[in-house]
Image (cartoon, rainbow, N blue to C red):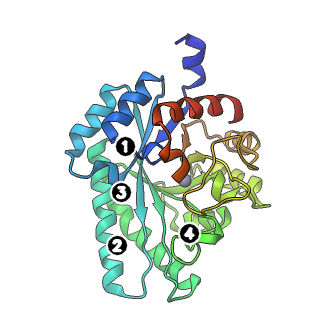
C-alpha cells in the first residue's frame, strides 16, 4: 500500500458491529492488514475473553482503541432496575479501563412507561453517579443523541441540543457528546450545536454511515457513506471547525451488509471513506 493511501486512512476507525460476522480477532487482523488504524469495540465482541489480553492483541495490530460501545440504558420506572443499569455501567467502565480505551459511548435509554422528562432526569442522575469512577479510571463518557424514532425505548436524548444541555448541567471534563450523522443529519440546529460542544471541549466522537431511501429497517438498514442523503462532508467540516481531529468511526448496522463477504465489504468501506467522507 502506498504512503498516500495510508495517510488517507489515518483517521478511519471501524466499529466492530460494522463487520459483525467477524469475531474481534478476525476484525483486528483484517482492519490492520488493510491499513485501518482505529477500532471501536462493541461490548458483545468481548464476551468470554480476557479483556486486558484482547486490548493488547489490538495494540499489537497497531490499532488505536477509539471507544467501547456501549454504556447507558439508565431510565426505568423501577428503581431496582435503575440500580442494575448502574451496576452494568460500572462494569463497562472497568472493561474500558482493562481494554485500554479512554472513551465509552452512552446509548442513554428510555422507558415508554414514563415521560421523556422522567427518563431524562434518570439519565442525568445515572451519568452523575458514574463520574467519580469514570474519572478514577481515566475514561470519558460520551452522550450519543439518537434519532427521535428511538425516543420510546433506546434514548430520551434525541437532539444534540439536549445532549449539550445535559453535558453543561453535569459540568465535568469526563462527560461530553458523540455526534452520529445517522441520528442528527436532519436537525436544523446541527451546525450551531456542533460549534457549541466544540467550545466546551465536549465533542468526543464522530460516527458516520448513511440514510437510505427507502429504509427498510430503522435499526439495521444503515447505508454505506455515499449511498444515502446525509451530507457527510458538510457535517464533517462543521465537526472539524469545532476543533475535532480524532478518528472518524464507521458504524453501519446492516442486515444486508452482514450477509456479504466481509473482506469485500471492508474494501467498500475504505473506498466510501475516501470518496464520500
Ligand atoms: Zn453512533
**Camera-side mark, 2 or 3:** 2
Label for residue 134? 3
Cα gap from disc 2 to disc 1, whole angstroms? 21 Å
Q: Is residue 253 visible?
A: no
Examine the rendered structure and indicate whether residue 238 appears above or below residue 271. below
Q: Is residue 171 left or right of residue 191?
A: left
Q: Earlier in the sequence, mark 2 or mark 1?
A: 2
Q: Earlier in the sequence, mark 1 or mark 3?
A: 1
Q: Residues within 10 Å of mark 3 (few under 14, many from 20)?
A: many
Q: Is residue 133 visible?
A: yes
Label for residue 85? 2
**Mark 1 residue's CB less than 8 Å from ligand 1:** no
Relative depth, front residue between 67 and 61: 61
Cα gap from disc 2 to disc 4, whole angstroms? 21 Å
Relative depth, front residue between 91 and 141: 91
* Residue at the (32%, 41%) spot, across then down: 100
Q: Residues within 10 Å of mark 4 (few under 14, many from 20)?
A: few
Q: Mark 1 sits on what residue?
A: 101
Q: Earlier in the sequence, mark 2 or mark 4?
A: 2
**Camera-side mark, 2 or 4:** 2
Q: Earlier in the sequence, mark 4 or mark 1?
A: 1
Report if the CB atoms under discs 3 and 4 are less than 8 Å apart.
no
Q: Mark 4 sits on what residue?
A: 169
Label for residue 22? none
Cα gap from disc 2 to disc 3, whole angstroms? 15 Å
Cα gap from disc 1 to disc 3, whole angstroms? 12 Å
Amino acid at each position: 500500500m502506498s504512503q498516500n493511501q495510508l495517510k488517507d486512512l489515518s483517521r478511519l476507525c471501524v466499529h466492530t458491529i460494522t463487520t459483525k460476522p467477524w469475531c474481534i480477532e478476525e476484525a483486528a487482523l483484517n482492519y490492520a492488514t488493510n491499513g485501518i488504524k482505529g477500532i471501536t469495540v462493541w461490548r458483545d465482541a468481548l464476551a468470554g475473553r480476557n479483556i486486558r489480553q484482547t486490548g493488547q492483541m489490538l495494540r499489537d495490530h497497531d490499532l488505536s482503541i477509539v471507544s467501547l460501545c456501549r454504556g447507558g440504558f439508565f431510565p426505568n420506572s423501577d428503581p431496582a432496575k435503575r440500580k442494575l443499569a448502574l451496576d452494568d455501567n460500572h462494569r463497562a467502565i472497568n472493561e474500558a479501563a482493562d481494554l485500554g480505551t479512554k472513551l465509552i459511548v452512552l446509548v442513554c435509554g428510555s422507558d415508554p412507561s414514563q415521560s421523556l422528562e422522567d427518563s431524562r432526569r434518570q439519565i442525568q442522575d445515572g451519568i452523575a453517579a458514574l463520574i467519580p469512577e469514570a474519572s478514577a479510571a481515566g475514561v470519558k463518557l460520551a452522550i450519543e443523541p439518537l434519532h427521535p424514532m428511538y425516543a420510546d425505548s433506546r434514548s430520551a436524548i434525541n437532539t444534540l441540543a439536549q445532549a449539550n444541555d445535559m453535558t453543561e448541567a453535569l459540568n465535568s471534563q469526563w462527560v461530553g457528546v458523540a455526534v452520529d450523522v445517522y441520528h442528527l443529519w436532519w436537525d436544523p440546529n446541527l451546525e450551531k450545536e456542533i460549534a457549541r460542544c466544540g467550545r466546551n471541549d465536549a465533542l468526543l466522537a464522530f460516527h458516520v454511515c448513511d440514510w437510505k431511501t427507502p429504509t427498510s429497517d430503522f435499526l439495521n438498514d444503515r447505508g454505506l457513506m455515499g449511498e444515502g442523503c446525509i451530507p457527510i462532508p458538510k457535517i464533517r467540516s462543521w465537526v472539524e471547525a469545532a476543533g475535532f481531529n480524532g478518528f472518524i468511526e464507521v458504524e453501519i448496522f446492516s442486515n444486508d451488509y452482514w450477509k456479504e463477504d466481509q473482506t469485500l465489504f471492508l474494501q467498500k468501506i475504505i473506498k466510501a471513506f475516501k470518496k464520500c467522507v
